[in-house]
Image: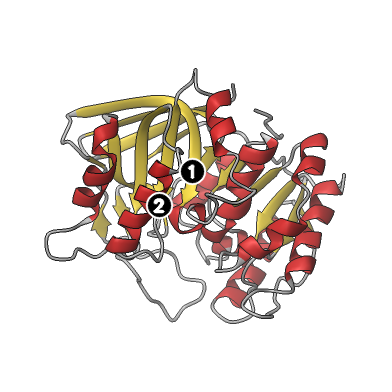
Amino acid sequence: MKYPSFIKKGGTIGIFAPSFGANIDPYQTRLNEALTRFKSLGYQIVIEGSIFGYQNGASDSKEKRAEAFMNLYQNDQVDFIWSVGGGEVMMEILDFIDFDVIKSLKPKFFMGYSDNTNLTFLLTTLSDVASIYGQNVTEFGMRVLDPSLVNALTFIEGKKTTQTSFLFHEPKNVETTDPLASYQLTEPTKWKNLRNEDSIHLEGRFIGGCLDVLLLYPGTKYDRVSSFLDTYKDDGIVWYLEACDLNIFAYKRALWQLKNAGWFKHVKGFIFGRPLMLEPFVDMDQYTVTSDILGDLNVPIIMDSDIGHVQPTLTLLNGAYAKIHSSQGKGEITFEQK
């Protein structure tokens, strides 16, 4: 695994919009505030492409979005690459990304989440470059940064290797009229060990992302997961997964699909984030469905962790070796570059 250098104060952050652009509020106001904040913190900013644009469900054409990423990756003045936001059709850019060229270049961290799984996951499984699954740059446009975002900044500066669960989280689909507002943290956070174990300790090669995106890859030329898993089989694999738009039936189909595509070989355990849309249906909920599909793998499973679309979230080093502990509703993840 190749580990890029973390960003340093005074370093250069490359910003682009591989999926949605910040073309409407609250995102436009937030992004402008975030850019102002990072400049005031001493970072240099390089913008590629149309970060405030809109075209066919994205910020720009698929070719231009891919070009923006490749330009940033090949620009020796850029130290760190950050996505403006998530979206729906980022997979369109993949045919115009040269992962072989990326593999030959000095590695750089790319950071984003949700639809950005298209790069965080494939940079790691295709090019063997670690990436960061964490908040998009627009999220840093709060008037007062949430502690989770302060934590993220500390992490990407290389000053923190351990992530600890938060005390509270937002309700699902919370709304605000203030584009610069902080999170509304009203719900107690409780990591759940699926089989009600008193304590779970997991360690292994850490890989995953947004389940909505991952289910696109089996059967395509981008599915080299089996080779990746074999490379790191001696470490064992810890999957982190989170669902955005999937309902309970789509969630069950997704887990079934990845399992039967062979993606869960060499698995040592799973950690799932808080789902955004998984409402129970009669006798089905996220816990019964997960147990039904993954139970026969006989590995520990942690649910409702601080990963995904229900804020706040941890900042994750995708592709690293991870040690995870979950006990009494609280959890901790430590990353090692090995």
Q: Quadrant of residue 38?
A: bottom right
Q: Residues within 10 Å of mark 1 (few under 14, many from 20)?
A: many
Q: Is residue 286 visible in the rendered structure shown here?
A: yes
Q: Residues within 10 Å of mark 2 (few under 14, many from 20)?
A: many
Badge 1 amino acid = Gly
Residue farthest toward the top in the current orientation of the protein = 234
Residue depicted at x 45% and y 50%:
148
Q: Which quarter of the rendered picture does the C terminus lie within?
A: top right
Badge 1 is on which residue? 208
Give the x, y percent position of residue 215: 47, 54
Q: Is residue 165 visible in the rendered structure shown here?
A: no
Element class at badge 2: strand
The disc, 1 or 2, on the residue closer to the chain's N-terminal end is: 1
Element class at badge 1: strand
Badge 2 amino acid = Glu
Q: CA distance from mark 1 to mark 2?
A: 9 Å
Where 9 sits versus 71, above or below? Answer: above
Badge 2 is on which residue? 242
Say which of 134 and 104 sits in front: 104
Marks 1/2 in contact by CB < 8 Å: the verdict is yes
